[in-house]
């Protein structure tokens, strides 16, 4: 039991240090958030031929659900954005029948600092089944397109992190539609 408590304490200390460093870095930036990604022209080619995508949303902290960042809320936001863009959202069995099992993976990590600010890191990526060139029998799930962002918001305005999620999904939708023009 003593070892478990020691590990918990070390993890908590590391989380606090990470939060402090992240908040300090973000406060030095003139913007509340910064975006970056791997959506190069080369990666965009992986979007061509998709018939739609499933959606998987993951967050790390349950304590923030009542503030508007519950998995169900974010999933609805993402699916709505995709449908509004004309992208088919694949349901469970449809995803399994789609070549490559494509899904848009949304990962939102939240960390509250002692000052009350909440730092977030967001990653939105298209996951698909791929095969290795050196051995086509080896098949794995991999990210073939992604964007990320980090930022801070006040705890009272936590639902504002839904904006960067929608922005990232808009970016995906634009790339998806460019790679799959209507004929």
Image (cartoon, grey):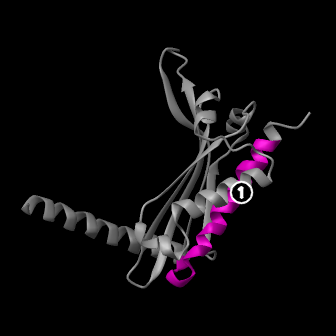
88 vs 96, left or right, is right
Residue 31, x across and y down, in percent: 64, 74
Which residue, given by chain and number where applicable, does mark 1 sit on?
80
The prevailing secondary structure element of the residues shown in magenta is helix
**In magenta segment, residue 38:** no
Residue 129, x across and y down, in percent: 56, 29
Residue 126 placement: quadrant: top right
25 relative to 71, above or below: below
Q: Nearer the viewer, residue 92 or 157?
A: 92
The structure residue drawn at horizontal position 61% and vertical position 74%, both measured from the top left corner, is 160
Q: Quadrant of the C terminus?
A: top right
- Residue 149 in view of the camera: no
The structure residue drawn at horizontal position 51% and vertical position 32%, both measured from the top left corner, is 141
The structure residue drawn at horizontal position 64% and vertical position 26%, both measured from the top left corner, is 99
- Density class for disc 1 (Cα within 10 Å; few <14, some 14-19, many ≥20) is some
Magenta region: 153-177
Q: Nearer the viewer, residue 28 or 128?
A: 128
Q: Quadrant of the N terminus?
A: bottom left
Residue 156, x across and y down, in percent: 53, 84
19 vs 108, left or right, is left
172 relative to 182, above or below: below
């Amino acid at each position: 039991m003593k070892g478990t408590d020691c590990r918990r304490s070390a993890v908590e200390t590391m989380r606090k240090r990470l939060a402090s460093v992240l908040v300090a870095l973000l406060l030095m930036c003139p913007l509340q958030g910064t975006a970056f990604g791997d959506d190069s022209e080369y990666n965009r080619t992986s979007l061509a031929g998709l018939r739609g995508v499933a959606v998987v949303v993951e967050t790390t902290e349950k304590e923030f659900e009542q503030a508007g960042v519950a998995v169900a809320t974010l999933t609805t936001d993402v699916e709505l954005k995709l449908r509004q863009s004309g992208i088919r959202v694949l349901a469970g069995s449809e995803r399994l029948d789609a070549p490559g099992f494509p899904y848009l993976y949304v990962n939102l990590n939240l960390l509250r600092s002692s000052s009350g600010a909440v730092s977030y890191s967001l990653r939105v990526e298209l996951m698909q089944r791929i095969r290795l060139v050196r051995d086509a029998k080896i098949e794995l799930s991999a990210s073939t397109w992604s964007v990320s962002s980090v930022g801070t918001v006040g705890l009272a305005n936590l639902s504002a992190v839904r904006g960067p999620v929608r922005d990232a999904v808009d970016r995906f939708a634009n790339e998806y539609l460019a790679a799959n023009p209507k004929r």
